[in-house]
Image: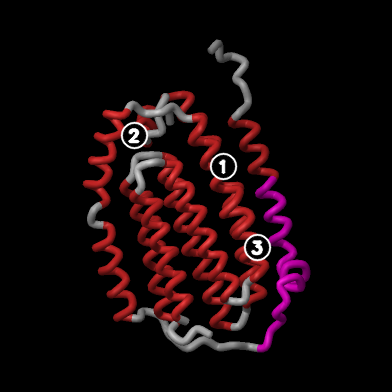
Amino acid sequence: MITDHWLFLTFIVLLMVEGYYLIVITYNMIRVLIGLEILIKAVTLGIIVAGYLSGQMATAQAMVITIIVLEVVVMIVAAGVVVGFHNQFDSVNVKNARSLKG
Amino acid sequence: MLTLVFLLLIMVGFALWAIFTNLLLRAAIALALTSATLTIIMFRLDAPYAGAFELSVCAGLIPVIFISVISLLQRIPLPEQIERRQKRLKRFWYLPLVLLAIGWLFYAIKPVPGNFIRPEIINDVRVVLWDQRRLDLFGQILALLAGAYGVTILFKENKNNDH
């Protein structure tokens, strides 16, 4: 039983900050994806905690399953983009993306 | 409650390890451990279906994708690795301070209301997923097909490309 939900919300915010921080600070595309993953973990935990507190665990679990499926699709496509980028530039540095057309 | 707090601390710790570690392989493993810890938290919060998905997909499949991508990339020479490590640590050293400050502020201010209503509702995830949120399933199937199509396009060989 959760007695202090603020503690949970604080940890969720901390995870989100970690994810945002990694995405903003790093230049490595794979690390950007890892940051995105950490952000998604925070969102997943947030939905589960909200479902637990409001007594709607079934809906929360259904939403989390949807999130996980979408997360996999995003990661697979993003991984393909990273490999394609590396084949083009021999690097995964996001600074190289500035020289792309468009 | 104490166990849950301990698990949350471990989870944030693993996420920090994924951020600070120099090797991408270790970062992928730390991410898998973060997911595994989240799975334990989910089981403790009465979410076994979501926990099973999290464990099999996020702690299993996604690290494999990351490791596959890392294995496809070229290795950086050692001197450049050391230089990059030093530069990266310079950019990241104040993250724990930022985390402590934001965590303390959020816990002290409590910006959202604290009373939660617990209505009488259907609490079977199978009923919710199949009867109430069936459109989600269509969305998931479409997203999977879009992902498969996207990967096919990305790895398609360009006929006009000579090399």
| Residue name at image x 51 percent, y 33 percent | B71
The way the protein has been coloured in the rendering is secondary structure
Reply above or below: B65 against B47. above
Q: Main secondary structure of the magenta part?
A: helix
Amino acid type of the residue tagged 1 in the rendering: Ile
- Disc 2 crowd rating (10 Å Cα; few below 14, some 14-19, many 20+) is few
Q: Nearer the viewer, residue A33 or B97?
A: B97
| Residue name at image x 31 percent, y 29 percent | B78
Q: Which residue is mark 3?
A: B52
Q: Nearer the viewer, residue A51 or B72?
A: B72
Amino acid type of the residue tagged 2 in the rendering: Lys
Q: Residue A10: x, y in percent?
A: 38, 73
Numbered badge on residue B65:
1
Q: Is residue B138 magenta?
A: yes
Do pointers 3 and 1 mark residues of a single chain?
yes
Reply above or below: B75 against A59. above
Amino acid type of the residue tagged 3 in the rendering: Ala
Give the residues in magenta: B120-144
**Count of numbered badges drawn on the protein:** 3
Q: Residue A45: x, y in percent?
A: 51, 68
Q: CA distance from mark 3 to mark 1?
A: 19 Å
Q: Secondary structure at mark 1?
A: helix
